[in-house]
Amino acid sequence: MSNRTWVCIDCGKSYRRIQSITAVACSICGEPCEYVHWKIHIPSPNKKKDWVEFWSIYRRETQLIERFKQDPKIKEITLELLNQRWTRS
């Protein structure tokens, strides 16, 4: 079975856990970690500007995916990080 990558945005710590786990708490700060798709390159937390920009785009895209799933009026979305376009027929 493959693993998933989880990242604590506040601490910058990443974790690899089995695929069946649905949530991971950071062992440093205790905050919930974000699941990140395996195709996405996560910038180093030491590069603060890149780190903040990445998470801003990532959160925007995950919200966009949720809106797309809930609102049938949305016909198409483009995801910059995953380099994907989702469309409805």
Image: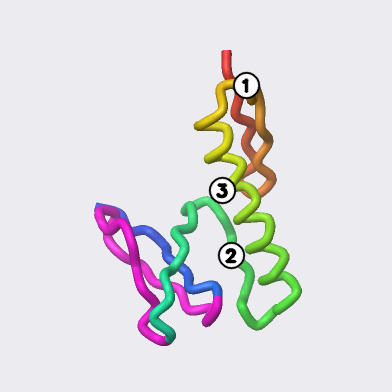
Q: Nearer the viewer, mark 3 or mark 1?
A: 1
- For mark 2, what is the residue? 42
Q: Nearer the viewer, mark 3 or mark 2?
A: 3
Q: In the figure, residue 52 lies in which quadrant?
A: bottom right
> CB under 8 Å between callouts 3 and 2?
no
Q: Which residues are magenta?
A: 10-28
- Across and down, in percent, residue 43 comes to 63, 69
- Across and down, in percent, residue 70 comes to 51, 31
- Across and down, in percent, residue 48 comes to 71, 78
Q: Main secondary structure of the magenta part?
A: loop
- For mark 3, what is the residue? 62
Left or right? Give the position of 72 relative to 1.
right
Q: Earlier in the sequence, mark 1 or mark 2?
A: 2
Between the residue at mark 3 and the residue at mark 1, the CA separation in whole angstroms equals 18 Å
Residue sitting at x 37%, y 58%: 4
Residue sitting at x 41%, y 70%: 32
The disc labelled 2 sits on which kind of residue? Answer: Ile
The local crowd at label 2, few if under 14, some if 14 to 19, many if 20 or more residues have their Cα within 10 Å, is some
Give residue 73's mark: 1
The local crowd at label 3, few if under 14, some if 14 to 19, many if 20 or more residues have their Cα within 10 Å, is few
Between the residue at mark 1 and the residue at mark 2, the CA separation in whole angstroms equals 32 Å
Instruction: Check disc 3 and report its element: helix, strand or loop.
Output: helix
Count of number-bearing discs: 3
The disc labelled 1 sits on which kind of residue? Answer: Lys
Residue sitting at x 39%, y 72%: 15
